[in-house]
Each structure stands twice: as structure tokens, then as C-alpha cells.
Amino acid sequence: MKIAVVDYDMGNLHSVCKGLEYAGAETFITHVPSELASADAIVLPGVGSFDPAMKKIRDRDLEQPLKDIIASGKPFLGICLGLQILFDRSDEGQEAGLGIIAGNVRKFQSEPHLTIPQMGWNQLTLSQPNCSLWETLDTSAWVYFDHSYYVEPNQSSVSAAMVKHGSQTVTAAIAQDNVMAVQFHPEKSSTTGLKILSNFIQIAKPLNR
């Protein structure tokens, strides 16, 4: 079982690798399309801003390879910014996203006493409770967030989990076929996060060659 972690110079790749390895996977970091295609599953992490992320993906000629890998049915997990760039566009910038998931990325609206970014632990509400990513997970699990923008899919059925920040309830995770992605950081979310990573590994195992 080998999981490729996509290197596009936008995140702490090693902490994600450590989380996956602790959960039982063998990982490698790469931006080479042929190496991504040979992996059993793909993880796309990310920390930072939407436009620089998309520019780096295009500079490394990764846009079409990522789309092809997703279209092939290979298990795919996006984390934080790796969730946001799956969408069409973001209020944060001008670049087009990957367009894998129809919808946009929005900024939290200011409210009295509301902290932006949302930084710290918050409670999930599972809107796709049967999603394999949540297997044996508490229905009100707590995970770690650090973000000022959130995804807004055109189809609400894509949302796999929600989170409330202030008066705003927004998508915290999506799942559509082989594509899963989370706004929070599972690698920073203690035993709950490790369980989510372990579940992703289990999803990928049946396809292992």
C-alpha cells in the first residue's frame, strides 16, 4: 500500500506523511505524474492561499495529471487548501481551480465576537454518516481547523460533514465517488484524525495491486 503525497510547495508535507505512516501506510512525496499514477492512492495537502497554489500546480504541469488520476477512480484525499482547490473558484483570488467539484470558495462573514480565521478545535456534524471516511467515528467528532475560507458546493449532497462557526454552518468535508476532502487537519486532530486517515487507507486497500 503506497500513498503519494502531492508536492506543489504549499504545505507541511512531512506532518501529513507521518500521520499516514502512523495509521499504517507507506508514503512518498512527489510531483512526477508517472509516480502519482503508480500510487495506490493520492493525498493533496495544502496550506496557504488559493491563487499561489493553483499557479504552482500549473507551473509543475500537475493540473491535467491530477484530473486524469481522479477520473481513473483512484482514491483521492484533499486536506485544507487541498480541498479548496478542487472547486471552481475562490473569493480569495482570481485563478480558476481544478473544477473537480462544482462550487466556489467563500470567506467567512464578519460577526461580533467571531474569530477569523477559525483556528482550533470544532465539532463535526456528519451529513454523510455512511461515508467510509467516517467508519467507527463518533457522530459528533472534534477536529482541528485553521482557515478563513470555506467551500460552498453547488450540490449540497456532496457535503460529507458540516461545522458551525459563529452563526454560519458550512461544509467541513466533501465526498463524491472516489474523491474525498476535508477542511480540517486530520494530522493535527489526535486520535480522531488518525482514525480518519486509517479509514482512507482502508478505502484504498481493495484497489491495491
Image: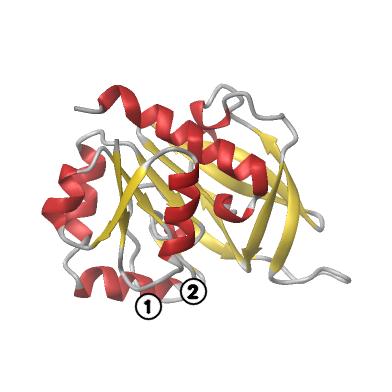
How many residues crowd around disc 1 within 10 Å: few (fewer than 14), some, or many (20 or more)?
some
Pick whichever, 169 or 2, lies toward us.
Answer: 2
Whole-angstrom CA distance, mark 2 to mark 1, is 8 Å
Which x, y percent locates residue 21?
43, 46
Q: Amino acid at mark 1?
A: Pro
| Name of the residue lying farthest toward the left | 34
Look at the image and tell me whether residue 83 can be seen: no
Give the residue drawn at x 37%, y 78%.
Answer: 52
Residue carrying label 1 = 52
The count of marks equals 2
Pick whichever, 118 or 120, lies toward us.
Answer: 120
Give the residue drawn at x 62%, y 39%.
Answer: 161
Give the residue drawn at x 51%, y 61%.
Answer: 105
Which x, y percent locates residue 39?
22, 43
- Horizontal side of 41 relative to 106 (left or right) equals left
Which x, y percent locates residue 139?
71, 29
> Element under label 1?
helix
Point out which mark residue 48 bears: 2
- Horizontal side of 91 relative to 13 (left or right) equals right
Q: Amino acid at mark 2?
A: Gly
Which x, y percent locates residue 108?
67, 65
Look at the image and tell me whether residue 203 can be seen: yes
Quadrant containing the C terminus in the rendered view: top left
Are discs 2 and 1 less than 8 Å apart at CB? yes
Residue 56 figure quarter: bottom left
Residue 120 figure quarter: bottom right
* Colouring mode (rainbow / by chain / secondary structure / one colour): secondary structure
Give the residue drawn at x 55%, y 44%.
Answer: 173
> Element under label 2?
loop
Quadrant containing the N terminus in the rendered view: top left
Point out which mark residue 64 bears: none
